[in-house]
Image (cartoon, helix red, strand yellow):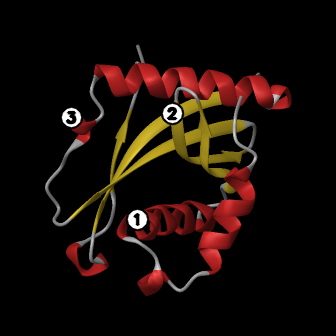
Amino acid sequence: MGSSRGESFGNFVDRIPMKMQPPGAQAETRVSSLLQRQGWQLLDRNWSCRWGELDLVLHKNEQLLVVEVKKRRSLAWGPWSVDPTKRRRLGRAISCWRAEHPIQTDWLLQVAVAVVPLPPSQGAPRWCRLDRLC
């Protein structure tokens, strides 16, 4: 069963000044803020179940977007960090999330990896869409 801490935890972290957040939370905040400026609404942040954690779950126009956030010290691109095992766990966690949120089961699902260089002066996040989770 999933954690109910997702949305409230995400809202709490978003209120902490960026420079006081741990690096992983900074990366998630950057991606979340960027997507919210593009009209996406945050549903959950750091939602977890026995299969793993979903960093960000957002929606816009009956589309569901799940983002796996990876922080990096440079612009080095690392989508390979989401290996087949991680993809399976991510797929199972998404299934658990959708089971707990049945109203969104018919929404179009998109899954992406955001590689976020820290500090922010290293550049903008880079994106990779995940088409296959298993």
Q: Is residue 36 left or right of residue 85?
A: right
Q: CA distance from mark 2 to mark 3?
A: 18 Å
Mark 3 lies on a secondary structure that is helix
Residue indicated by mark 3: 80
Q: Amino acid at mark 2?
A: Gly
Q: Is residue 118 above or below residue 50?
A: below
Mark 2 lies on a secondary structure that is strand
> Which residue: 33% across, 61% down?
125
Q: Quadrant of residue 121?
A: bottom left
Q: CA distance from mark 2 to mark 1?
A: 18 Å
Quadrant of the rendering where the N terminus is positioned: top right
Quadrant of the rendering where the C terminus is positioned: top left
Q: CA distance from mark 3 to mark 1?
A: 18 Å
Q: Are marks 3 and 1 in contact (CB under 8 Å)?
A: no
Q: On residue 27, which mark appears?
A: 1
Q: Label 2 neighbourhood size at 10 Å, few (<14), some (14-19), many (20+)?
A: some
Q: Is residue 67 left or right of residue 82?
A: right
Foreground mark, 2 or 3, reads 2
Q: Quadrant of residue 79?
A: top left
Residue indicated by mark 2: 52
